[in-house]
Amino acid sequence: PPMIRRDDYRPFGWLVPETKLDFELGLESTHVTATLTVARNAKADPAPVIRLNGDGLEPESVLVDGVPATNWTMDEGDLMLPLTGEAHEIRIATTIQPSTNSQLMGLYASNGMLCTQCEAEGFRRITFFPDRPDVLSTYTVRMSGPKAQFPVLLCNGNRIAVGEGGDSHWAEWHDPWPKPSYLFALVAGDLVARNDSFTTMSGRKVELNVYVREGDLDRTEHAMESLKRSMKWDEEVFGREYDLDLFNIVAVSDFNMGAMENKGLNVFNTKFVLADPETATDADYDGIEGVIGHEYFHNWSGNRITCRDWFQLSLKEGFTVLRDQLFSQDMGSAPVKRIEDVRILRMAQFPEDSGPLAHPIRPDSYREINNFYTATVYNKGAEVIRMMRTMAGEERFRAGTDLYFDRHDGEAATCEDFVEAIEDGAGLDLKQFRLWYSQAGTPKVSVSLEHEGNTATLRLGQVVPSTPGQLDKQPMPIPLKLALFDRASGKHGGEQLVVLDKAADTFTFDGFAEKPVLSINRTFSAPVTIERDVPREDLVFLAAKDDDPFARYEAMQELMTGHLVAAVSGSLGDNDRAAARADIARALGAVIADATLDDLMRGELLLMPGQTHIAEQMLVADPGRIHAEREALKAAVGAVLAEDLVAMHARASTLPFTMDAAGKGARKVKTIALTYLAGADPERASALAASQYDSADNMTDRQGALMVLAGLGTAERTARLIDFYNRYQGNALVIDKWFALQASSLHPQAIEHVKALADHPDFTLRNPNRVRSLYMAFAGNPSAFHAADGEGYRMVADLILALDPINPQTAARFVPSLGRWRRIEPGRAALMRSELERVAAAPHLSRDTFEQVTRSLD
Ligand code: B3K
Ligand code: ZN
């Protein structure tokens, strides 16, 4: 497959002001007639032939200005049609088969309904079209089909006409806003809606619907409330108002990702719509609020202003992730949300940035764009824009985004357009800052603090590591929020922002009779790795006293990570190990006892660093040893703090179920207590977990208890797993949890459990949620996936090979876990590599999997 390059961008030779689509709907076969009005694009090179992209389509008839055309040719699935005049009308008919569309791109059948997914290049699987984001067109769509099978017919924009005849009916929709083809959507099915409305700041009354299958309606309240909150928040915080009279959300159970921001018709994975306390956890509720917000916010950052080409993806995704993060921060606990977002970044993006698939947030080339919907483009993209906001301050940043929305409304824009608008609107000089868009790799910042007389001297250095295709890097501006604490009083004289924009720099601070304690990269002001030699007592100090909650969390993490890295590298004697564990247990004990903390934050401070994060600190990691040391620390802490943990569990258990911060916090610390206890005293933890499970009146408690039980070899385990399955049989989202809990468990036989579950009658490769619930959970379970004999690697490679012909987009998502081989100890690395080679050697690999495997082996 060819390599597409950012530098090769050329505007399209034709404009498509109007698009008319006619769908005769059927699950087996749908007939599509597309009528395009095209006109020469004065801003592009003359194009005698128009390229209409197609993927697996055959033209049944091609008419130009009403006359059958015979001079067209096919090029790699695309239809090439010579055109002589300035403007024409092209009409093309095709027939597609939704029910055999297992890729879930284009028009496909899910559970008896029809729906679409067009981003990035799915529209070309529906009809021939210039399927690129810089071709904006106004759509009018007519659809007809059997009334009984498809009582609900939905499309973008507004419904302008309906009619019926015999068993069939039709609807016509018009979307007044010009849009690229990737934002097209159509849904037809037997659906019911929760209906509501929102009145915008200028007084427009918008009808809101959340469409689901009959029986799911009573689980849509949270989605609807989240939507209304999103609409209000975007008006208040970004000045953005909704621009149609109708906003529809449809939930479908077969979906490749979370959701899709189609204009006026968002299509969602059921996982991000359906919730009630009996079946959804607190994390599920938060996920729904975040994704509903994310897709809604795309209406401005993505739809009103779209991307010129797919290299600019972070223009809409990075910015929209930042917007959804800020929204969730405002809806709940801001510090806890920030900590969660940093944890995701470190878990998903840092490894990407330090591995074979590293790429800048604005990539330079790709073979398959679906492979670039990554944590780098999304989450690091959000961090990059967040840094601009930190440097400008909220008010000036808002002036920048106002200018951006104003200047580029209705356009297909670039990342450069965004940076310029922030520069002009916020009054920032971002010349050097643009490197964040072009350089991949997580910068390493070295930090040391010296003290002499009354002066503290801070020495900072930065290195941006080499990444594939980028060997030499330039220093980037790195905004670091910091504070210097007086040891005696536990106070600091104010937070400061320093911007490190050289390879090395020195900053001095006067007025310190004694060496202060440094708190740096507060709120995680820059997405970098801090490298410093810091005494454990300073970390204990910050963990207890820092007034920035993020910095407190960070100090706790550093305390545990530092110890685990030392322990794994074998540089610790028995005494050092015991001393470190004692310090950690004492710090954690102080967190349990600290009455000033709320439980949500307490839970964050009690979390152990994940195995991926620990592995990231080492050049080559031994997953077996990391796992062993991490479990040993957990057990040691659990033993020392057993009574405190049991008391915390008991205290939190007395709170009745509520959805406020107190209720959520109580549930969070309960399960954390069980986790530590399970390491120290499995029998006691098992009994406590079983009683939490049995008395649970909500999914958070039930799932948390079952998660702990699933990892233990106790009698309570099997009975609860069976109970859970029987209780929720038929509820796909909950059965997904049942698969995931077992696949991610600490149980020594987890690998055998996964094999058995793959043969379970409820398992299928055709539903992405189910595939992810078993195999993503497994690939993220270090002790099972990294089994020393390579069995885990073999299973994931087998999955990739089996899934690739069915759903290449989802199959390719499993490659990165094997692609980490260079950072793993040599024995396992060889096994991982040979599995990648086995995949690479398979015939007929999809473009998706081929690209990921090749990059991982290079
Ligand atoms: N824009 C879509 C993602 C489409 C992914 C295509 N492989 C959802 C989102 O980011 O909001
Ligand atoms: Zn998005």
Image (cartoon, rainbow, N blue to C red):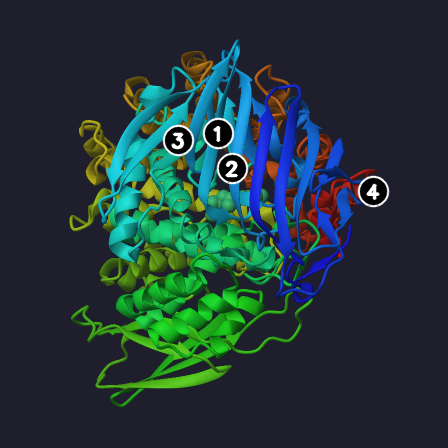
Between the residue at mark 3 and the residue at mark 4, the CA separation in whole angstroms equals: 40 Å
What residue did someone put label 2 on? 140
Amino acid type at circle 2 is Thr
Q: In the rendered image, which residue does mark 4 sit on?
A: 841
Question: Which residue does the image show at 71% across and 52% down from the upper left?
Answer: 367
Residue 664 position, x and y percent, is: 26, 36
Residue at image mark 3:
273
The residue that appears at 44% across and 27% down in the rendered structure is 161
Q: Which mark is first along the chain, 1 or 2?
A: 2
How far across and how far down the image is residue 279, in percent? 36, 23
Vertical order, 753 against 593 (above or below): above
Q: CA distance from mark 2 to mark 1?
A: 7 Å
Marks 2 and 4, how far apart in space? 46 Å
| Residue that carries the numbered disc 1 in the rendered image | 172
State the separation of the CA atoms marked 3 and 1.
Answer: 27 Å
Q: Is residue 410 left or right of residue 466?
A: left
* Amino acid, disc 4: Ala
Label 2 neighbour load within 10 Å: few <14, some 14-19, many 20+: many
